[in-house]
Image (spheres, helix red, strand yellow):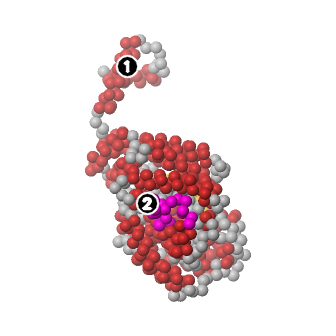
Amino acid sequence: MTLFWDCLMALLAAFGLICIAWPPLLWEKLDRYRREKHKRNEERPMELNEALEKLDALQKKSYAYEAGLSALYLDGDTVAPPDTEEGRALAVSVLAGEWHEKFTAPETGALLDYLTEHREELDRVRRRQVEELKRDYDKDRRIPADEYMEFERLTSEANAVWKRAKAGNDFGLFLPYLEKIVAINRKFAGYYDPGKAPYDALLDEYERGTSMAFYDPFFAALRERIVPLIRAVGEKEQPDDSFLHRHYPAEAQRRFSDYLMEVMGLDRAHCTIGETEHPFTLSFNNRDARITTHYYEDDLASSMYSVIHEGGHAKYDMGVADDLQYTRLAGGVSMGLHESQSRFYENLIGRSLPFIEAIFPKMRELFPEQLAGVTPEQFWRAVNKAQPSLIRTEADELTYPLHIMVRYEIEKRLIDGALEARDVPGEWDRLYREYLGVDVPDDAHGCLQDSHWAGGSMGYFPTYALGSAYGAQMLKNMEAEIDVWSPVGRGDLSQVTAWLREKVHRFGGLLEPADVVKNACGQFDPAVYADYLTKKYSELYHL
C-alpha cells in the first residue's frame, strides 16, 4: 500500500495535479499517509550512512556561513566605504545568530551523540571530525544565542571604530567598545570552560593545552635569556638602515609584493593580495586565500615582511589536504602553529642572508635609486637591526617577544579585573618603558596599534611568541634532514615548503596541536628558540 501512495503522489506531482480540488476521501487518505510517513521517519532508528550524510551536510553548511562572514569581514576591512559598518554589523549578527541556532539545535546534538557512540565504525578522518564538532557543540550550546549575536555585531562595529580611533589617535573613541569586549570575553570564558580561570579558558581557545601556568614560565625563561642579549647588542654599533626609509613608491612596492608571492610559491590564480590598515590573511579553502598588506612609502621593510608573514599563513592553509576541505578539519589546527608558519617564512627564511641574496637583483631592478650602493649584506644587516621600538609588527626578532609580553600582561589583568580598560594606555606606556626602554608618544603608536582586541581576540597574542619558538625548533630539525640554504640562496623555497607540508600543513586539524608540534619539533624545548636568537645576534653584532 505504501508503494502505491508513493507512486500516486509522484505521478500527480509530475502532472501538476497536487493543487487540484481532491475528492475529500482521497485527500484525507493522502494527508493521513503523509503524517504516518513522517512519524515512521521520526521513530525509526538512524542508520550510520544516513548519519554520515547529515554530518557532511552540517559541515558544508558551517563552511557556507563561515565563508559569508569572512567575505563581509574582508570587504569591510579592505574596500568598503567608510562609515558603513552598521549594515555589515547587522548582517554579521543575523548570519552568526542563524548559524549558532542551527548548530546548537537538539538534532545536531543527537547526530553527534549517535556518531560518538559509533566512533569505532568510523575512519580516522570522520572520527576526528566528530570529536572536534562535539567539542564545539558542547561549548557553543552554553552560549546564549542573543549574546553570541551581540558579540558578532559588537566586534564588527568595533573594528571600524578602531580604525578611526587609530587614525585620529583617539583612545576615548574606542574605549566603550574595549570595555564591552573585555566583559563579553570574560563571560564567554565561563561558557568555554567554567572550571578554569577565565584567561586560561581564552588561552586554550587559541592554543589548546596552554594556560597561564604554561606561558608564565615560558616568558620568564625567554626574558632571562633575551634581556641581557638585548643589552649586549645595544652596546654595539648599529647597522645603517637609513636606506630603508628613502622614498619607495607604493606602485613599485606592489610589484615587489607580486614578486615576493611568486618566490614563496603562492599561486596567484588562487591567492590574491589586498590593502588594509592592519595586514591579515583569510583563507576560504586551500584553493582560495586572500592576504593583505599596508604600504608605507618611507618604509620598504614594513610591507615586504608583512607580505612574507601573511604569505606564510596562506601557505599553511593552502597546504591542507584536499580531503579535509569544507570540513571542521580544514585550515590550521591552532594559532600557535599558524603563527609558527607565518613567522618561519617572515624571519627564519625572509630575514636570512641567502634569501636576501636571492631576491636582491629584483629589488635593485624595482628600486635602483633607493638601493644604489647598497649590498645584499648591508640590506640583511639592516632588516635584522635589533633595537627596542614601538610597533610590534615592525619589531626585530630579538625584541619581538617583549612586545608580546606587554600584551600578555595587560590581557591577563583585564580579564581578571585587576586592570580597567580606561587604564590600558597608561599601563601600556609603563610596560614599554620597563620592558623595552622606550617612551610611547601617543596611543596610535601604543595600545591602538593592533586590531586584535577590536576583533574580540583576547588570548591570541601569546601565540606569536610561541609560534616563533615552534619555528626555531622546526628549522633545527629541517636543517638536520635536508639542505635548506642552498636552494633558498637560489630563490627556491620549494623544499622548505615541502618539508613543512609533510610535517605540518597537510594535517589541518586532523591531529591535536601537541601532536603536530611533536611531529615537526620533537619534544618542544623553548631553549632552542633562545639558542637560535643568541647565535644569530651574536654573529650579526660580533658579540
Marks 2/1: CA–CA distance: 62 Å
Q: Residue at x 37, y 71 (%)?
A: 524
- Asked if residue 495 can be seen in this view, the reply is no
Picture disc at residue 416: 2
Query: Residue 316 has which mark?
Result: none
Amino acid type at mark 1 = Leu
Span colored in magenta: 407-426
- Front-lying residue, 196 or 483: 196
- Say left or right for 311 vs 114: right
> Which residue is the site of mark 1?
30
Q: Is residue 406 above or below residue 88?
A: below
Question: Residue 360's x, y, as percent?
Answer: 62, 75
Q: Which quadrant of the figure contains the N terminus?
A: top left
* Residue 422 within the magenta-colored segment of the rendering: yes
Residue 78, quarter of the rendered image? bottom right
Q: x, y (%) of residue 67?
A: 51, 48
Q: Main secondary structure of the magenta part?
A: helix
Question: Against 112, is 372 above or below?
Answer: below
